[in-house]
Image: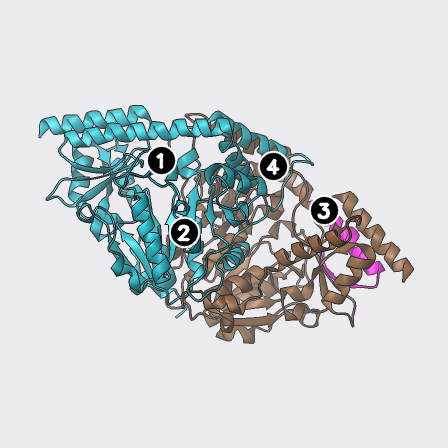
Chain colours: A cyan, B brown
Amino acid sequence: MSRNPYFQDIAGRYLFQELRERKRAFHEKNPDVHLISLSIGDTTEPLPETIRQALAKKAQEMGTDEGYFGYGPEQGIAPLREKIAEVLYHNTIAADDLFVSDGAKCDIGRLQLLFSKRAKVALQDPAYPAYLDTSILHRGKDSIIRLPCTPENNFFPDLTLAKKADFLFICSPNNPTGHIFTFEELEKLVRFAQKEKKIILFDAAYAYYVQEAQGADGKLFPRSIYEIEGADTVAIEIGSFSKMAGFSGVRLGWTVVPEKLRYPTGEPVKQDWLRIITTFYNGASIISQYGGIAALSPVGLKEMKAIVNFYLENAKLLRAAFEDLDFEVYGGIHSPYLWVRQKGKTSWQLFDELLHNAHIQTTPGVGFGTSGEGFLRISSFGRRATIQEAIGRLHAMHAKM
Amino acid sequence: MSRNPYFQDIAGRYLFQELRERKRAFHEKNPDVHLISLSIGDTTEPLPETIRQALAKKAQEMGTDEGYFGYGPEQGIAPLREKIAEVLYHNTIAADDLFVSDGAKCDIGRLQLLFSKRAKVALQDPAYPAYLDTSILHRGKDSIIRLPCTPENNFFPDLTLAKKADFLFICSPNNPTGHIFTFEELEKLVRFAQKEKKIILFDAAYAYYVQEAQGADGKLFPRSIYEIEGADTVAIEIGSFSKMAGFSGVRLGWTVVPEKLRYPTGEPVKQDWLRIITTFYNGASIISQYGGIAALSPVGLKEMKAIVNFYLENAKLLRAAFEDLDFEVYGGIHSPYLWVRQKGKTSWQLFDELLHNAHIQTTPGVGFGTSGEGFLRISSFGRRATIQEAIGRLHAMHAKM
């Protein structure tokens, strides 16, 4: 049998592709209806001035003898790695432990290659579908251990379930729930990984949405797993410019694989990761990398912050609207995502209600895992006018009911 | 064991990474020596005007409400796919069977996921290292079947060796040998795959270097495997803008997975490939994709052709020089690569001779497989002055011997 047998273990379509198809089908049947999407987590605000000028400048320079760039180092150009280390990690992470990627999703897939075909992987449930699907395509559905995260356990998994896992995907601020771990919770995760010899793949793609605020433990919410002492011996961190700088179409991210990280059997992970990226990858677009450097300049940071705050303001408006409609609402504070439910209704029932009565497209929570049943994920990415129009429709729908 | 055990099956370093390190070591020991590299196949000519303007324009537009682009379709934007289908395949390939990538190397790695862990893969030997290394990291060294391609068999493999393979990586014009298959040879390969139910992964990254000329069979040399009737039932083709348009740093390529292609067991391959790219990938940079569209415009094509011809002229000059030095010379006509040897010398002996006596860095052929022993790969990518300087050094070295 030459075909990868694990294709049979995964749903035929990737969730977001499925939603795109449904949207198209709705449009075909209702050509006059203007559907608002609060579904896909895709940025909508144009690139800030500093970034677009830097991208255009590098593009122009690529046409000159001095500015032309062929293959860059697979690990990413040094000035970008140094800037990420300095600005986003205050040099607590070495630039040499940073690997520039063409986006978090691509590195999630490549990271799978670090582990054997027999490795077991624990995932939060619900979770970003790429963790599950890349895991299944590499080692089948029996390799998966699900860690339910619901309001009932305050979105913190029962770690005893993860004891049989070799590695864990953990995401905070979480996609899809919008939930964020406190410092103490993240510390508990790191101690678990240290004690039980697990590797954590920590997805921090939404780190830039974390506000300077205290959690229930009285400590500031963490933006990086490396804020926890000793995390560099057990954790890989995945970062992204997509949601921070509107780079979802520009393609740029990074992964931190610390020098100190070891497999349970003692071999260093970093050298394997370097082997993987040099073998499976040829670096992010040089133009995008120069955009990344500009984003991390003082002016770029200010511009990015303004956009992140804009999406967070959208989230605040949407939170209020769903609360008005008697939804239970989670997330949307340190995250662009809201996670909402009305007890007694399934995800697809809520999805259809909003689609047909308010012409709003959302994402059914059950698409992110069985523990997502009953929820919808609401994305705050959108132009302000669109968000306001959506809120108007929600209120109008509510008034009619 | 959580670590991927196949890391033990591959050489610690990727060949080109190894060469980069050796170059650095030489520079450290000989800081005053200006080393010329005819080693890595990396483009050196600046991007043509049409392309760089298109890249800069899209970068600027990303800062506007109308021109901003978030996630593009994973398969690539339709105008680019349509342009590739029209210009490079004369619409013999449907745009819907084309998948835009961030480069051939990345898709080579992703294509591995189509096949089961037990699949066997046949590779030309010598071959571009990514075929071997991505294969090993997916299914170990015992999955590899090597097909020697040497002057002794006119670089055409003994296909009976491939009977136990499930899929074959085939590259023409070949990297590293610079050899090109005739129409008849390619036809023989396709017929073999049809009869024996194999899938061919055809790497056509250097297709744009193929000259309009007749092979020994009296037919024009093929640029695409789909010129052979029925190839769309057995072959995937991998294409790239890197060597055609100088995009090695811009990152853009494509893969053709025809609707008609089936696994030996009958399932269509295309739907699995769509699943892979939507799961493991988020599309090529939107800016790069607009660069690709410009490259395929009438003016862009003319500009690209001029650059390709420039590198081919380099190859011609280098061919003459190595022939003057009594090397056996292959390739360098439909390819930027020359494959040269002097009988009785190993690859690393030749490498050291040129490094120390002419201060020229090359690539040892044995790095591409055991059948590459005794050869050097000479890359024609370089500024003209550099190539001329290299040729001068070669002649000076020869005169002294």
Q: Which residue is mark 2?
A: A231
The answer for how far apart the CA atoms under marks 2 and 4 are is 50 Å
Q: Could you tell me the amino acid type at mark 1? A: Tyr
The residue mark sitting in front, 2 or 3, is: 2
Nearest to N terminus: mark 3 or mark 4: 4
Q: Secondary structure at mark 3?
A: loop
Q: Which residue is mark 1?
A: A209
Name the side, left or right, on which B17 lies relative to B7: right
Q: Nearer the viewer, residue B65 or A273?
A: A273
The answer for how far apart the CA atoms under marks 2 and 3 are is 45 Å
Task: Tell me if residue A401 comes above or below residue B361 in the rendering.
Answer: above
Mark 3 chain: B
The magenta segment is B309-335
Q: Could you tell me the amino acid type at mark 4? A: Gly
Residue A14, position as x, y percentages in the image: 32, 50
Identified at 89% across, 63% down, the residue is: B401
Q: Which residue is mark 4?
A: B300
Number of residues whose C-alpha sits closer than 10 Å to that of mark 4, classed few (under 14), some (14–19) or many (20 or more): many
State whether discs 2 and 4 lie on one chain. Answer: no
Q: Is residue A236 magenta?
A: no
Q: Quadrant of residue A358?
A: top left
The answer for how far apart the CA atoms under marks 3 and 4 are is 21 Å
Q: Secondary structure at mark 2?
A: helix
Q: Could you tell me the amino acid type at mark 3? A: Gly
Residue A315, position as x, y percentages in the image: 28, 31
Identified at 91% across, 58% down, the residue is: B399
Q: Which mark is residue A169?
A: none
